[in-house]
Amino acid sequence: MRIDLNGEVIRTQALTLADLLSEQGFDAPCVATALNGDFIARSMRDATRLDEGMKVEVLSPMQGG
Amino acid sequence: MFYGVDLTSRLMLGTAQYPSPAVLLEAIEASGAEIITVSLRREGAAGAAFRNILSESRCRLLPNTAGCHTTREAVTTARMAREVFGTSWIKLEVIGHADTLQPDPFALVEAARVLCAEGFEVFPYTTEDLIVGEKLLEAGCKVLMPWGAPIGSGQGLRNPEGLRTMRAHFTGIPLVVDAGIGAPSQAAQAMEMGLDAILLNTAVAKAVDPAAMARAFGRAIQAGREAFEAGLMPRRDMACASTPVFGLAELV
């Protein structure tokens, strides 16, 4: 299926958010995730299923003012 | 000073826009800051080096919601930040206009209400408006962060009288001047007025020598605080000789 990951449309085999992080090579403990604008806690990633066209944000600690 | 945390330094330092991670680390150390601000972004090239600094630095982290324009975006960002940084502190920014980066006070109060109810300890980036400040306190905020001038502008205190009024109105509430400070003298001015702390970033990061500027800010802020505690003399409209007139020789 195709989903929007951090602003880019990608094809994925992943069925859950946790699968997606591992498929895309993210360091899962060090990122925060949101699905269609809502925060998804680390503990919910396994249970969060992906659907065609969903918007996923995977964010990391960065510099800020 | 902030949510039950006592601090020695009254300078809070932003971590963005430095020429290199090494310079950032030097600047943090030179400033004496015990709180640094951080953000959440899509992974970029400098991400790993930055996270090394976070692990090396002994500072407490204050994640921000920079770039959020709506309550929803800010609330989601805060929730993400709490998980990834492991802190309930959040510098709440809800931007109302892309050019001025002025806070949207309506969305700010709404977001503060949601986040305080969820146990966040909110540091709201606000204006000097007293009623907005009261609403933020009602929402559960225990600190207010009025702007000095638009973010990154380096203009200093655009409305010193407004900040003075705010200081008088919110007795006992920590007030942090956040944004717009360009020079140590401006930071000292705010501290002399009795504001509790200064949050800055660009003035240090964009200095020719960021570490030296960070040290200068740290000292100016300390000097301003000491001056406030010492009690400034009242201002006069006319001159008043400091050397005694009594005993003056007649030499004409």
Image (tube, rainbow, N blue to C red):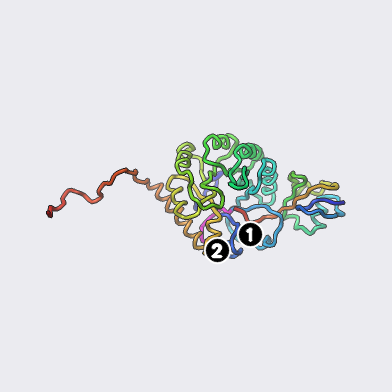
Point 65% across, 48% down: residue: B67
Q: Residues within 10 Å of mark 1 (few under 14, many from 20)?
A: few
The residue identified by callout 1 is B55
Foreground disc of the pair 1, 2:
2
Point 52% across, 36% down: residue: B130
Which numbered marker is on residue B3? none
Q: Element at badge 2? A: helix
Between B60 and B65, the one nearer to me in the picture: B65
Which numbered marker is on residue B26? 2
Instruction: Tell me where the magenta segment starts and ends, as one range.
Output: B25-36
| Disc 1 and disc 2 on one polypeptide chain | yes
Q: Earlier in the sequence, mark 1 or mark 2?
A: 2
Horizontally, residue B16 falls left or right of residue A12, namely: left
Gap in angstroms between the C-alphas marked 1 and 2: 15 Å
Quarter where residue B109 is shown: top right
Quarter where residue B15 is shown: bottom right
Instruction: Give the chain of mark 1.
Output: B
Cβ atoms at labels 1 and 2 below 8 Å apart: no
Image location (x, y in percent) of residue B172: 48, 39
Asked if residue B31 lies in the magenta stretch, the reply is yes
Note whether residue B89 is visible.
no
Three-letter amino acid code of the residue under disc 2: Glu
Note whether residue B3 is visible.
yes
Q: Residues within 10 Å of mark 2 (few under 14, many from 20)?
A: some
Image location (x, y in percent) of residue B29: 53, 61
Q: Element at badge 1? A: helix
Point 51% across, 50% down: residue: B198
